[in-house]
Amino acid sequence: MSDARAQRRRAAWAALSTVLDEDSLIDTLWLQHESMGGDSVSDIIAFVDSVGNRHLLDGVTRKRLYGAFFDALRQPEDSLPIDPWPLMIAARPAAAAPTPAPVRAAAGAAAAPWAAAAALPASPERVAAPDPQLALPVAPLASSDGSSIAPPASAVDTHELPPHQVVFSTLIGGLIEGVRQYHPQDLADVLADCRSRIDQARIAPSVRAAARDALVAPTSRAWKLDGTQDQLVALVHQVYVSLCEALGPVDADHLLVSAVRQAERLPEARACPPQRFL
């Protein structure tokens, strides 16, 4: 398998080739090389937003690119464009050292147009992140009296829970608690819409019943649901759609990014990254 930087370059080319020409793509890949240090949701958001700021991409386009880049990073190597590192070196030869780990380039590739994989369309329920022109900073937030408010903390008892259930509990609990803290006037509507949408989710009846009970008294402990990872992913998607409907996509994304960052700090996130629920 190629190294992580090569995979990020190839994924970026696949996702961004639908909106940038080749020269702009090469400049953008150098920006990625110098500033993108990982593959987390926050890394993806920051990189796509920096590209969006440089090229004046609108919020809808950015959201599509979040999903396309996230998906491309997880595609098999043989479905992505070959590594554009040689093109980057040709454009900026003075920056060639140190050369990253082995480059897989076909003979003559640097002189030929690069075949980019089509960017994967973002699902309507694909997790999106805030447009920096519109969204409030994730943390710290301010209360009505001007004091700082920390992001919602999880109080889930994680004793003996599988990692995917621990991460789910923190993620979904953070979303609902975020509504309670920062959009209290919308909490009743969000919970009612969530209960309605949960009925549409493809999950076991016992998990559906437990989720509906949790929404009646949505404490963090209530989200200890005994469901499979796929079932809990479906629940996160339905709750996110409810947030978008009730709060609008900008505020919904704001709460989502905060909850994801909170879940990423869990020890269980090593075994089950919160990105699996997005």
Image: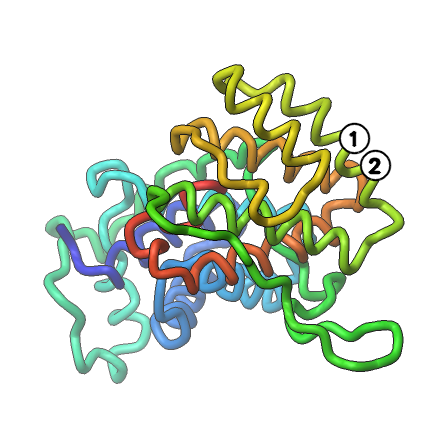
Which numbered tag is attached to residue 58? Answer: none
The residue sitting at 14% across, 60% down in the picture is: 103
Question: From where the camera sits, is residue 60 visible?
Answer: yes
Q: Quadrant of residue 212?
A: top right
The tag on residue 189 is: 2
Q: Amino acid at mark 2?
A: Asp
Residue 133, compared with residue 57, is above or below; it is below
Q: In the image, 60: left or right of 12?
A: right
Above or below for 210 versus 171 = above
Q: Nearer the viewer, residue 69 or 264?
A: 264
**Mark 1: few/some/many CA within 10 Å (<14, 14-19, 20+):** some
The x, y position of residue 191, in whole percent, is 75, 36
Estimate the x, y position of residue 137 in percent, counting from the top left: 68, 70
Q: Amino acid at mark 1?
A: Ala
Residue 226 picture location, percent across and down: 43, 31
**Secondary structure at numbered mark 2:** helix
Residue 35 left/right relative to 42: left
- The part of the image, by quadrant, that contains residue 118 is top left
**Between residues 248 and 143, which one lies in front from this camera angle?**
143
Distance from Cα at disc 2 to Cα at disc 1: 5 Å
Residue where numbered disc 1 is placed: 192
Is there a contact, CB below 8 Å, between mark 2 and mark 1? yes
Please report the residue visible at 41 percent of the width from the left and 51 percent of the height from the top.
Answer: 158
Q: Is residue 140 above or below residue 111?
A: below
Judged left or right of residue 127, residue 135 is right
What is the crowding at mark 2: few (fewer than 14 residues within 10 Å), some, or many (at least 20)?
A: some
Residue 252: x percent and y percent?
A: 70, 49
Residue in front for this viewpoint, 122 or 100: 122
The residue depicted at 27 percent of the width and 58 percent of the height is 84
Residue 70 in view in this figure: no
Can you tell which quarter of the image residue 145 is in?
A: bottom right
Q: Secondary structure at mark 1?
A: helix
